[in-house]
Image: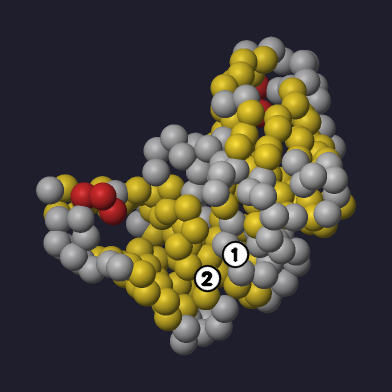
Amino acid sequence: KAGVTQTPRYLIKTRGQQVTLSCSPISGHRSVSWYQQTPGQGLQFLFEYFSETQRNKGNFPGRFSGRQFSNSRSEMNVSTLELGDSALYLCASSFMGFSDTGELFFGEGSRLTVL
Amino acid sequence: EDQVTQSPEALRLQEGESSSLNCSYTVSGLRGLFWYRQDPGKGPEFLFTLYSAGEEKEKERLKATLTKKESFLHITAPKPEDSATYLCALVPGAQKLVFGQGTRLTINP
């Protein structure tokens, strides 16, 4: 079956702009979670959506937001980009969420570069 | 504050040389501890979930164990294809997922 698909894979933005990243989960999965990965901070949890509702949230500023649609596809948005937002953004899907089995299926990520 | 610390940061082994990776944690309450493998340019791949002290899980050359303060990922007779970054993550009492910084493992043929 098809895996988790993230688009775009690579993008370059300038400071102050905003960006929207998309994630299509595995068919039947209702939970989508987002992560930021950087060499310095490692992998950090952004938020989780389940059946169109944000269920959990990490310690990121309000510039980071997301949503989930009725077909479980999810988007995350970063407004007023800063240089420090340069990172690999990973999306993961699961049937019930990470708190149940921990078995998350990750996409290959969207690599964002902020100039 | 919930913290996860992995050691060593990097480990280089010869093919067939067994070793262990460590994940120590301080959390308010543990709902589950997970191990993932990440290859360069890829997203993490799920390996194991451990829920309680004393639990063990095995998969091919990998075996994960859990105590009240740490988890170990034992690698027996590794092969070059086991080279990857191994990530430990856990769900503390609060509803969030916390990752360690990872151990970068290299197996030389």
Residue A16, percent from left and from top = 77, 16
Q: Contact (CB < 8 A) between labels 2 and 1?
A: yes
Q: How has the structure been colored for display?
A: secondary structure
Depth check: A97 or A2 in front? A2
Image quadrant for the C terminus of chain A? top right
Rendered image quadrant of residue B3: bottom right
What chain does badge 2 belong to? B
Rendered image quadrant of residue B94: bottom right
Is residue A55 toward the left or the right of residue B75 in the image? right
User: Are discs 2 and 1 located on one and the same chain?
Assistant: no
Residue with the mark numbered 1: A102
Q: Residue at x 49, y 49 (%)?
A: B44
Is residue B71 toward the left or the right of residue A56 in the image? left
On residue B91, the disc is none
Density class for disc 2 (Cα within 10 Å; few <14, some 14-19, many ≥20) is many
Amino acid beneath label 1: Gly
A29 to A100, vertically: above or below: above
- Of helix, strand and loop, which one carries label 1? loop
Q: Given the current orientation, which residue lies at the most extreme bottom position?
A: B54
Q: Residue at x 39, y 59 (%)?
A: B7
Residue with the mark numbered 2: B49
A66 to A7, vertically: above or below: below
Q: Is residue B36 visible?
A: yes
B75 to B102, vertically: above or below: below
Q: Given the current orientation, which residue lies at the most extreme front position?
A: A1
Whole-Å distance between the Cαs marked 2 and 1? 6 Å
Task: Report the number of numbered marks.
Answer: 2
- Of helix, strand and loop, which one carries label 2? strand
Q: Residue at x 37, y 74 (%)?
A: B58
